[in-house]
């Protein structure tokens, strides 16, 4: 076993203890007070490691934490999100527990284990004294709903960075992410005219009828060969069975593998026109996250990480996903981005979510070496 992996293996219990603390500090995206407790905890921990720390106040979401350590430009940017999809109180239903090599708990896999790796890798890199450039960490509070408040910060930091390392969980069974689909979200509202469905049916114009026609158009935009999917996930409309519906709405999710395809599909969705005379359509939304495309620079960065893994005595593979992350933003700016450097495990956003602790030392050692060699 490589000495660095061995060191983290010896310290695994410490890492699990920190993971427990982070999981028990519940941090749902929409509960600012809870997330702020976690951001304060992390700010103190990073200050204790000698980092320059700035807590960036937010009104709607939790406060972001920006920390930096070391010298040398351009810096390495490390992205971690503090928020989870689990409401406060979930920890009482599913307390943090370790069974064999698996650690369970809300938010453990996505992505509090990644935060643990970041802190322990930084500490090890400081002691070893091999880092040649500044490392900038952003712990943001609103990644799950779309990084609405943190995106400008991420993009500003990325424009100054050499590379971006994203500590989102890996693709099971442990692959790093070298590409992600782009994500668009839309809300479509149709207005018709209400009427009694028995006595005055012909005087009504059904918003549901119109919107059903639009749903068929939307789903026809799906092209699995190109990796494009359009999904109407919510459909609401009408008031009573005996009333011609005056209004209906849908919520739509769009995914695309390339920016060219994403922009084309977004344009088609935004240009929807009514088919039934007398109805009106309003489309709101757009591209929330651009695709993270597998560029030569990203491949080169992955190959570097793979060589480091071999040096450390293990192998890593690459994969992609339809889900988005903050890595989408950095990659779209042309910054070499490596995602999925966080936990090995499974069950993101699911009740069986877990971290495979057997791989925690390896992943932390790999991150340490990335800090030292980039």
Image (cartoon, rainbow, N blue to C red):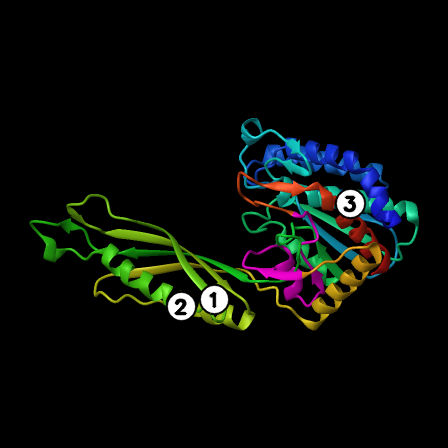
User: Residue placed at 37% from the left, 64% from the top?
Assistant: 218
Find out whether residue 333 is within the magenta segment: yes
Q: Position of residue 340 (x, y in %)?
A: 67, 54
Rendering coords of residue 143 (x, y %): 60, 48
The residue lying toward the viewer, choosing from 52 and 250, is 250
Tell me the residue that label 3 is attached to: 361
> As displayed, is residue 86 above or below residue 304?
above
- Asked where in the image residue 213 lies, by quadrant, the reply is bottom left
Q: Earlier in the sequence, mark 2 or mark 3?
A: 2
Q: Are marks 1 and 2 in contact (CB under 8 Å)?
A: yes
Residue numbers of the magenta segment: 318-344
Tell me: 273 left or right of 24.
left
CA distance for labels 1 and 2? 8 Å
Q: Quadrant of the C terminus?
A: bottom right
Q: Residues within 10 Å of mark 2 (few under 14, many from 20)?
A: some
Element under disc 1: loop
- Residue 76 lies, in percent from the top left, at 79, 57
Q: Callout 3: few (<14), some (14-19), or many (20+) C-alpha neighbours within 10 Å?
A: many
Residue 266 vs residue 294, the one in the foreground = 294
The answer to whether residue 56 of the structure is visible from this angle is no
Gap between marks 2 and 3, in whole Å?
Answer: 44 Å
On residue 221, which mark appears?
Answer: 2
Local secondary structure at mark 3: helix
Q: Which residue in the structure is indicated by mark 1?
A: 228
Q: Earlier in the sequence, mark 1 or mark 3?
A: 1
Residue shown at 84%/36% (left/top)?
A: 48
- The disc placed on residue 95 is none
Extreme residue in the left direction: 199
């Amino acid at each position: 076993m490589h000495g660095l992996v061995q060191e983290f293996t010896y310290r695994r219990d410490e890492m699990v203890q920190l993971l427990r603390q982070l999981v028990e500090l519940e941090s749902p995206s929409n509960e600012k007070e809870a997330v702020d407790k976690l951001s304060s905890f992390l700010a103190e921990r990073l200050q204790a490691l000698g980092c320059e720390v700035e807590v960036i106040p937010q009104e709607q979401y939790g406060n972001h934490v920006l920390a930096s350590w070391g010298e040398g430009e351009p810096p390495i940017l490390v992205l971690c999100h503090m928020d989870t999809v689990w409401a406060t109180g979930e920890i009482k239903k599913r307390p943090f527990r370790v069974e064999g090599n698996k650690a369970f708990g809300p938010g453990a896999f996505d992505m509090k284990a990644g935060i643990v790796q970041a802190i322990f890798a930084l500490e090890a890199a400081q002691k070893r004294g091999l880092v040649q450039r500044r490392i900038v960490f952003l712990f943001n509070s609103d990644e799950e709903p779309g990084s609405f408040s943190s995106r400008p910060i991420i993009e500003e930091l990325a424009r100054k960075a050499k590379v971006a390392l994203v500590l989102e969980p890996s693709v099971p069974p442990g692959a790093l992410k070298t590409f992600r689909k782009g994500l668009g979200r839309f809300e479509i509202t149709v207005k018709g005219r209400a009427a009694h469905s028995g006595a005055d049916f012909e005087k009504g114009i059904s918003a549901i009828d119109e919107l059903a026609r639009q749903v068929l158009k939307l789903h026809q935009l799906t092209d699995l060969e190109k990796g494009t999917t359009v999904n109407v996930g919510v459909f609401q409309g009408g008031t009573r069975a005996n009333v011609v519906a005056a209004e209906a709405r849908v919520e739509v999710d769009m995914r695309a593998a390339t920016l060219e395809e994403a922009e084309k599909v977004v344009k088609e969705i935004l240009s929807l026109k009514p088919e039934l005379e007398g109805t009106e359509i309003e489309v709101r939304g757009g591209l929330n996250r651009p695709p993270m495309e597998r560029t030569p620079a990203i491949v080169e960065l992955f190959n570097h990480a793979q060589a480091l893994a071999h040096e450390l005595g293990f192998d890593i593979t690459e994969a992609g996903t339809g889900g988005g992350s903050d890595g989408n933003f950095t990659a779209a700016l042309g910054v070499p981005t490596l995602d999925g450097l966080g936990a090995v495990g499974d069950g993101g956003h699911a009740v069986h979510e877990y971290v495979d602790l057997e791989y925690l030392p390896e992943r932390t050692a790999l991150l340490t070496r990335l800090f030292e060699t980039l």
